[in-house]
Image: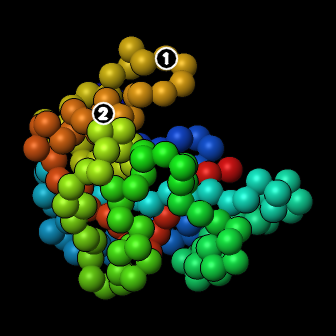
Amino acid sequence: VAAVTASHFFVCDVDLWPSRTLYSVILGLPEAYLSKAMYTMVVPAFEISSTIHKAVGHRAVPDTFEGLKLCADRGLCQIFKHSTDTHTSTWYKKWWEFKEDQGAYKVPCFDSIRYEPYLLVPKTEETPQFDERFVGYGKNKIQFVTHLRFAGFRFHALPGAYVVHI
């Protein structure tokens, strides 16, 4: 966090591809979402079937909301880590129905202490530092999200944009 020079930063793994509209959706948010120091934006995460990915590679990655919807309807895309509780608090059912022009919707509660969404986070004096002592795999985002929660940050899901695990 200390090295960030922008007003916000995106906490994301290197093996996730953003939707084509992610940046424009962020820029199109009502000012209230980006100007509030204690608001984070959850970017929903999906994964594609490994069979499809092996067959057609990166061409299988849907880069629009409509493409993602079609992929999900065909059973080829699903919520990232669907078998764990690390992303369920995003309320994906609501996300599918929410419209970009409605802004973002509040994630009212966490279904699990293991919730580790990918986040757009404001860089403020209140923003906790990302604990760099975590090395290897796991728990770093969970710790950071927990720290954000206890610092008083509010979580809102970003409609119309997403990331896909590759």
- Tag on residue 135? 1
Give the image location of residue 11, x and y in percent. 41, 43
**Which residue is found at the position 27% from the left and 71% from the top?**
104
**Which residue is found at the position 41% from the left and 67% from the top?**
92
Q: Identify whether 106 is placed above or below 123.
A: below
According to the image, label 2 marks what residue? Answer: 144
Give the image location of residue 147, x and y in percent. 22, 33
Residue 34 visible? The answer is no
The residue most toward the front is 83
Q: Secondary structure at mark 2?
A: helix
Q: Label 2: few (<14), some or many (≥20) within 10 Å?
A: some
Is 72 on the left or on the right of 154, as rendered?
Answer: right
Q: Quadrant of residue 41?
A: bottom left
**Which residue is found at the position 40% from the left and 55% from the top?**
88
Q: Label 1: few (<14), some or many (≥20) within 10 Å?
A: few
Amino acid marked by disc 2: Phe
